[in-house]
């Protein structure tokens, strides 16, 4: 599965904050009890814009700490720790030395307290003079997307359906879903997807190929419209994290 960036200006139907806010609401709150040590809260960044539209690095401020973060084009960023609780994340072009001097109009997104781990999606916004980006949050809690599963987003105005290994995918325009493991181990599996245009009952071919399953990794997959292309495109990103050691997690099982 190919992983490439895309230009926000060429993508239609991209209502990111509204779409992702809806999915975030279905997560369960993970509350630490007794003397359990709360795990660090994590964030990984994904850029959904062309390589020239977003700086290679920006500064993320979570209300407590300002740090430089990478804006990768072809992959997820390194894992960054962020503050717990209900917070507002802001992006800045320069380090924030004094929180009281926070620039007005900095790109911002609220992260609810029940989201312990997130993907932070970044798209271009040339109208913002503080940092030329927009932000959206995707729920990455481990009970939301397990190892080997695929989190799908259809960011087009076309319905998409078909077979992904042993699973069946059906996505309405603007919809999202978590697809269970399409295979059982490190193996190739067939993918055959079609799309429908509104008002047209014909199933147009989207892709017919083989993908490789990695049971260790969670994945994100986006179906998008680029430029004047009539056929949507698929972009996917793998999120592998080392399993926790037995003494670091109740029951000895990592994410």
Image (spheres, grey):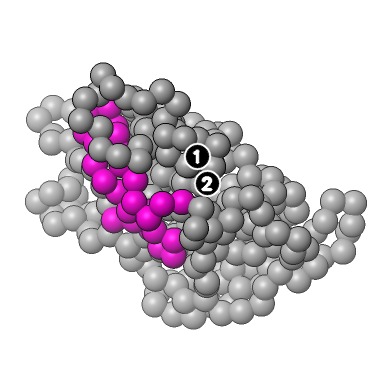
Q: Residue at x 29, y 56 (%)?
A: 78
User: Secondary structure under badge 2?
Assistant: strand
User: Secondary structure under badge 1?
Assistant: strand
In the displayed structure, 181 sits above or below 53; it is below
Q: Residue at x 40, y 46 (%)?
A: 119
Task: Say if mark 1 contacts mark 2, CB within 8 Å.
Answer: yes
Comparing 187 with 24, the one in front is: 24
Comparing 11 with 9, the one in front is: 9
Left/right of residue 197 with respect to residue 1 in the rendered view: right
Q: Which residues are magenta?
A: 54-78
Identify the mark nearer the N-term, 1 or 2: 2
Q: Residue at x 45, y 26 (%)?
A: 105
In the displayed structure, 18 sits above or below 161; it is above
Query: Magenta stretch mostly in which secondary structure?
Result: loop
Quadrant position of residue 126: top right
Question: Farthest residue toward the front?
Answer: 129
Quadrant position of residue 86: top left
Question: Farthest residue toward the top?
Answer: 100
| Label 1 Cα crowd, 10 Å radius (few <14 / some 14-19 / many 20+) | many
Residue 68 covered by magenta stretch: yes
Kindly identify which residue carries mark 2: 124
Residue 175 is at least partly visible in this image: no
Left/right of residue 40 with respect to residue 147 in the rendered view: left
**Residue 43 placement (x, y as % from top left):** 32, 45
| Label 2 Cα crowd, 10 Å radius (few <14 / some 14-19 / many 20+) | many
Disc sitting over residue 134 in the figure: 1
**Residue 39 placement (x, y as % from top left):** 19, 40
Quadrant position of residue 217: bottom left
Comparing 62 with 19, the one in front is: 62
């Amino acid at each position: 599965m190919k992983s490439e960036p895309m230009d926000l200006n060429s993508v239609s139907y991209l209502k990111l904050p509204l779409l992702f806010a809806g999915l975030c609401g279905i997560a369960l709150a993970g509350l630490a009890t007794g003397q359990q040590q709360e795990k660090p809260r994590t964030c990984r960044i994904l850029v959904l814009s062309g390589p020239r539209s977003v700086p290679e690095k920006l500064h993320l401020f979570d209300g407590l700490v300002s740090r430089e973060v990478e804006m990768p084009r072809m992959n997820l960023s390194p894992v960054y720790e962020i503050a717990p609780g209900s917070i507002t994340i802001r992006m800045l072009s320069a380090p924030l030395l004094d929180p009281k001097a926070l620039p007005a109009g900095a790109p911002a997104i609220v992260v609810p307290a029940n989201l312990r781990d997130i993907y932070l999606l970044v798209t271009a916004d040339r109208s913002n003079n503080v940092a030329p980006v927009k932000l959206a949050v995707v729920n990455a809690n481990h009970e939301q997307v397990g190892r080997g599963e695929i989190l799908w987003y259809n960011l087009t105005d076309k319905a998409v359906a078909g077979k992904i290994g042993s699973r069946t995918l059906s996505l309405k325009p603007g919809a999202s879903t978590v697809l269970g493991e399409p295979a059982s181990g490190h193996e190739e599996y067939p993918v055959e997807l079609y799309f429908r245009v509104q008002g047209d009952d014909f199933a147009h071919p989207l892709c017919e190929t083989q993908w490789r399953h990695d049971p260790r990794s969670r994945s994100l997959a986006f179906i998008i419209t680029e430029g004047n292309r009539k056929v949507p495109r698929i972009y996917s990103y793998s999120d592998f994290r080392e399993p926790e050691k037995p003494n670091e997690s109740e029951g000895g099982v990592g994410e």
